[in-house]
Image (tube, rainbow, N blue to C red):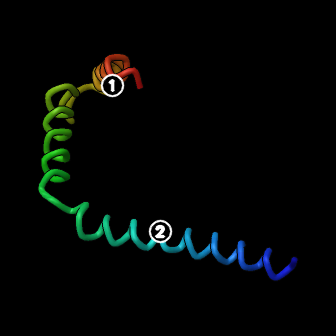
Amino acid sequence: MKRLYYQVYLTIVASLVLVVLVGVVLWRFVGQDADSHRVSELMREFAAANLAPIGAAPSRQRDELVALSRRLRA
């Protein structure tokens, strides 16, 4: 009975390791495509359009962050 327990345990651990390794390989080779760069650029443009400039008063920056978080429901 103990041997069966170890076999089941090792099968589960090996499956988890395999899933992690496949995920890392996919992330490394497939996840670094042009879409991720486009999403980053879009988020940069969105933040620049919706937030106060760096030199703005802290109260204005805070107010715009609060307004943006309400719009995004964050």
Residue at x 39% of width, y 20% of height: 73
Q: Position of residue 19 (x, y in %)?
A: 47, 67
> Does 45 appear above or below 10?
above
Question: If the image is split into quadrants, where does the N terminus sit?
Answer: bottom right
Mark 1, secondary structure of its residue: helix
Residue at x 39% of width, y 70% of height: 22
Q: Position of residue 72 (x, y in %)?
A: 33, 23
What kind of residue is marked 1?
Answer: Leu
Would you call the spot at circle 1 few (<14 residues within 10 Å), some (14-19), or many (20 or more)? some
For the residue pair 64 and 32, the one nearer the viewer reads as 32
> Does 65 appear above or below 48?
above
**Residue 61 picture quarter:** top left
Question: If the image is split into quadrants, where does the C terminus sit?
Answer: top left
Indicate left or right for 4 with 12 as reference: right
What residue is disc 1 on? 65
**The disc label shown at residue 20, or none:** 2
Q: CA distance from mark 2 to mark 1?
A: 37 Å
